[in-house]
Amino acid sequence: MIYLDNNATTRVAPEVFEAMQPYLTEHYGNPSSAHSLGRKMKAAVERAREQVAKLIGAAETSEIVFTSCGSESDNWAIGGYLEQNPARRHIITTRVEHEAVRNLCEHLSQIGFEVTWLEVDGNGELNLDDLRQALRRDTGIVSVMLANNETGVLFPIEEIGKIIREHSDAVFHVDGVQAVGKIPISLKEIEVDLFALSGHKLHAPQGVGALYIRDGIELPPFIIGGSQERGRRAGTSAVANIVGLGAACELAVSFDGHDEIERLRNKLEDEILQHIPNARLNGTPDRSKRLPNTSSISFEYVEGENILAHLDNLGIAVSTGSACRSTTKQSSPTLRAMNVPYSAAQGAIRFSLSRYNTAEEIDRALKVLPEIIDKLVQMSPYDSELQALKMSPR
């Protein structure tokens, strides 16, 4: 299998599995227990907390709370802060957020909250003047992702945090799920109050995440019960998964192969755009403003699901966008917000690489993809439009 769908989930790194294994076998105590086995489990959780804090540049390890996933972290951050501050009923977010944020804000708008939706341009970028104008006295929370999960477009959260501080008393929540482990992050140096991450995006197992809560920010517990996580999230800790997240964060701190991942991504992207006439890039062409591993490319007048199926039959895994909406037949809300024409949005494929991809895999994908697109073009009902694309200079 040539796996080019790492923004959906990553394989568990061997080093991570090795770190987890003892906590699935001989180390099985409850970290809340007072005996020596329980204390050993508690120590493992606290070490993982330190590893997460180091990767994202938190000032204090106590600012890290373990959760089950990025979606829980996002929901807790937004819903919890609004519950704690009921007079603040205005939310600002963007049209291109992950479903965990976008669908929650849509729900909140139906139960009495007011949501301001920031638009993006054709490159998937924000106009920060729109944010300045949207901020109000009753704005409770601003939620802007660090990196778009489909296009890889990065939002300038450092500048956004400064704007929020200068023009309001709102807190700033960032969905950092897609960016952690791929680009440098130092939260103690920027104005971010709440920051979500998820283990399975950086070679830890599925089922574990974390929420950074800046010291001084109060949230009610998302799960009510025992006193775990300093009373902030009840439930027995999933120690093996938490250890895995910590090990993955430590692995990410020492990883020095991002340039090679970007080189392979660039080769894949450049050759597709150069050699396939109906291919177009989704997201800014300025690669410094995108994740180094991600390319969203549309093949106009061809169905993305058909491309995916043909690649899958050849042992190559990609996606048509966010894995959280892969069962729907609608075009991506992100691409709609960017005003990507329907004929192109329906043919969008996301390629996302990881440390385990090789040059040989990229060469294989580049060899078979043009043949697949050519075959699907010949079957397309939009033959005249495609012939015009072939004739036009790039």
Image (cartoon, rainbow, N blue to C red):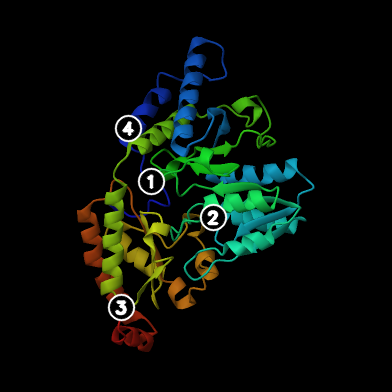
Label 2, on which residue?
98
Q: Residue at 45% x, 77% y: name it.
A: 343
Q: Which mark is residue 10?
A: 1
Label 4, on which residue?
15
Quarter residue 243 falls in: top left
265 above or below 338?
above
Q: Disc 1, disc 3: CB below 8 Å?
A: no
Quarter residue 229 falls in: top right
Which of label 1 and label 3 is nearer to you? 3
Element carrying mark 4: helix
Where does residue 35 sit, x and y in percent of width and height?
53, 10
Amino acid type assigned to the residue bearing label 3 in the image: Pro
Where does residue 208 sit, x and y in percent of width and height?
49, 37
Q: Which mark is residue 346?
A: none
Q: Residue at 61% x, 53% y: name it.
A: 163
Crowding near the residue tagged with mark 4, few <14, some 14–19, many ≥20 C-alpha atoms within 10 Å: some
